[in-house]
Amino acid sequence: MKGLAPVLGACAFASGFGIRIVDPMVPLLSAEFAVSLGATSLLVTAFAFSYALGQPILGPLADAIGKTRLIVLCGAIVSVLFLACALAPAFPFLAVVRGISGFAAGGIIPVAIAALSDSVSVAERQVALGRFLVASILGQMLGAAVSGVVSELFGWRAVFLLTSALMAAAITVAFMVLPHSPRVGEGLSRGSIFRQHGKILSSRRAVFLFCLVILGAVAAYGLFPFVAAILFERFGTGTYEAGLVLGGFGLGGVLYALTVRRVIGLLGPRWMSWAGGLGSGAALIAFAFPLPWTWNIASFTLLGFAYFMLHNKFQTHAAELAPGASGSAISLFAFCIFAAQGIGPLVVGGALSFLPIPVVLTLMGALVAGVGVLAPWILSKE
């Protein structure tokens, strides 16, 4: 359908905006509700785990009832839940509603990726998905940056109100423009879910791919909830500076998405994986050094460019795992990404409790570099 990509992109932008809004606000929310930084970072973990846990259901549901139907339904629910977050009277309420919103948000970007994958040829799929990343990454980049600025000027509740309105606007457009896609699956039941996922996971290549996805995402995203605290400890900065640094990650992703065809032509599959892993590792290790905080924007921009190079390659592999069940395949990919985003802060937080910051960052850098270097060899094994 003409116009499918822009409308799906608008939904992905709004959904992406809501994913990273909490990261720069962790110290602010910690002070507001008088809870520890570690406890406050559970807002990130709750959203990510809930997003991940919804994928085994939402992917097959999208295949069963139609992908655009599910996108509109989930977007409407997310908008209402973000409004509830803005009105949260206490931290437990905020944590629960933020977690539930993660489940509903899981029916937007992964399902949009699957819908787009169905509409383009295999030859153009990696380029199309790479360009689609622009919307999602821009959303995440601006979500982190705007969250830092708006929360400092108007308070954290204003961030959730803004995000709710943005999601409502995108979903209204989608409801009016997108066709109500027909059922394409066998219907939703416990048996059909198990069959879809079992078919995909019966391939050793799929299992290896998803393990690599988890390890890479743990290394890349695990640090995010602690960036504001690290910068404050080093330089006495606030949410504004943390938002700009985290926004660099999104900027790097956008730069990659805008140059994806040239990057693919220049590097090829193997070198893309190596460059993505080694570049991500180098960026994390650079953050281990107490450079001026403005320099960290550059290191996070490198991290975003390199990591999304690796992410795009893995995402394309996932889209090709199960022709005819792309919703289920992409949902498993998203499950791994967001499970890792939930696990990552726990791993990094635990490591920071007994290891110096530079050591933890170096270990995370070595992990993602290893994933990128070993991926071509591992995924060539069936």
Image (cartoon, rainbow, N blue to C red):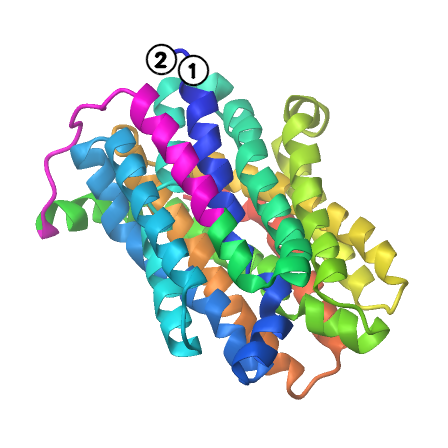
Left or right, 295 with reference to 376: right
- Location of mark 2 (residue): 1
Instruction: Tell me if residue 133 is in the magenta stretch.
Output: no
Magenta region, residue range: 163-190
Is mark 1 in CB contact (under 8 Å) with mark 2? yes
In the image, 223 versus 85, the foreground residue is 85
Q: Which residue is drawn at 32% across and 59% down?
A: 53
Q: Quadrant of residue 178?
A: top left
For the residues labelled 1 and 2, the Cα–Cα distance comes to 6 Å
Amino acid type at image mark 2 = Met
Q: Can residue 381 be seen in this view?
A: no
Residue 170 vs 52, above or below: the answer is above
User: From the image, which quarter does the N terminus lie in?
Assistant: top left
Residue 295 spot, x, y in % from top left:
86, 55
Q: Which mark is residue 3?
A: 1
Q: Is residue 214 visible?
A: yes
Q: Which of 33 and 131 is in front in this view?
A: 33
